[in-house]
Amino acid sequence: MATTPLNETVALVTGASSGIGAATAQELARRGARVILAARRADELQAQADAITTAGGVASILTVDMADPASVARLAEQAPQVYGRVDALVNNAGVGSGPPFARSTPDAIEHIVGVNLLGVMLLTHALLPAMLARKRGAIICVASVAGQIAVDPLYSATKFGVRGFALALRRQLRGSGVSVSVISPGYIRTPLNRNMRQRLPGPEIVANAIARLIVHPRREVVVPGYYRAATGIEGLAPWLVDRGIPVRP
Ligand SMILES: NC(=O)c1ccc[n+]([C@@H]2O[C@H](COP(=O)([O-])OP(=O)(O)OC[C@H]3O[C@@H](n4cnc5c(N)ncnc54)[C@H](OP(=O)(O)O)[C@@H]3O)[C@@H](O)[C@H]2O)c1
């Protein structure tokens, strides 16, 4: 599989206005990549891009609503025009779980699938042909430990879906020069988990792993690594995991 040195890389990071995406954009820029930050909130994106340029890096912003296929198509058209190409796509934008499934609205179901899964597939689909033509590219999909352990019906459905999509795409693209890697974080300290009181690792740990995956692709990385014990138990004895998941009818 071809690797992409970061100082020659143009990276598009979705969900770069906060949390893991913002930390990833900062880290990639620190390692010499030119970074395009995408999300809905232009002010937050600009603040992140300003921090990168102040530190000597190169960054631009593009707004996108990943739930809107027309907006995703616009991003796919605009992004390669910013620095001439997109070498690395970090599919990170995502929304978390809501109320129990029985109380979710059809709109909310469509929204989470649109942002977390359909948007990922559409953006990848739009940017892939140019990567294949150049025989060079790295696609990183941010899934979740909740894509290996079924915890929330909607969130887990989208993250199992992202993993299935990315793992199969990786097989389909073997030898093409375009790598596909999955990163599955456990609980990380970001606005997504603003209500959790426990001490959590910061988003930098995921950002570092993503930067490594662009240069050294891997099938799937779980961060922090200690979550591998839990994913192993889900595979071997799911009934044991049942006991740890709260009942929320
Ligand atoms: N934090 C964790 O514990 C954890 C664990 C496992 C996996 N993850 C995954 O990591 C990724 C990043 O999450 P995070 O924890 O960094 O959360 P976060 O701080 O809430 O960031 C989410 C990002 O996604 C963007 N986003 C949300 N809806 C969007 C939409 N419709 N269109 C475009 N962008 C959208 C947000 O930007 P705007 O609001 O500006 O659009 C924001 O930049 C997600 O895929 C999440 O599922 C997180």
Image: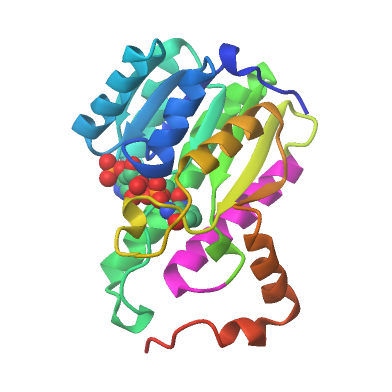
Q: Which residues are magenta?
A: 150-172
- Residue at position x 51%, y 36% in the image: 90
Where is residue 40, by image quadrant?
top left
144 vs 202, nearest the viewer: 202
Q: Is residue 93 visible?
A: no
| Dominant secondary structure of the residues highlighted in magenta in the image | helix
User: Is residue 181 left or right of 201 when viewed as pictured?
Assistant: right
- Residue at position x 65%, y 54% in the image: 225
* Image coords of residue 150 (percent x, y): 55, 73
Where is residue 88, by image quadrant?
top right
Q: Is residue 193 above or below residue 66?
A: below
Q: Is residue 125 above or below residue 245?
A: above
Q: Is residue 106 above or below residue 125?
A: below
Q: Is 68 part of what is drawn in magenta?
A: no
* Image coords of residue 105 (percent x, y): 27, 73
Q: Which image quarter is the C terminus in?
A: bottom left
State the residue lying farthest toward the front.
199
* Image coords of residue 10 (percent x, y): 51, 18
User: Is residue 147 left or right of 196 when viewed as pictured?
Assistant: right
Type of colouring = rainbow
Q: Is 165 part of what is drawn in magenta?
A: yes
122 vs 52, nearest the viewer: 52
Q: How many marks are shown on the rendered structure?
A: 0
- Residue at position x 51%, y 37% in the image: 207
- Residue at position x 42%, y 35% in the image: 23
* Image coords of residue 11 (percent x, y): 50, 24
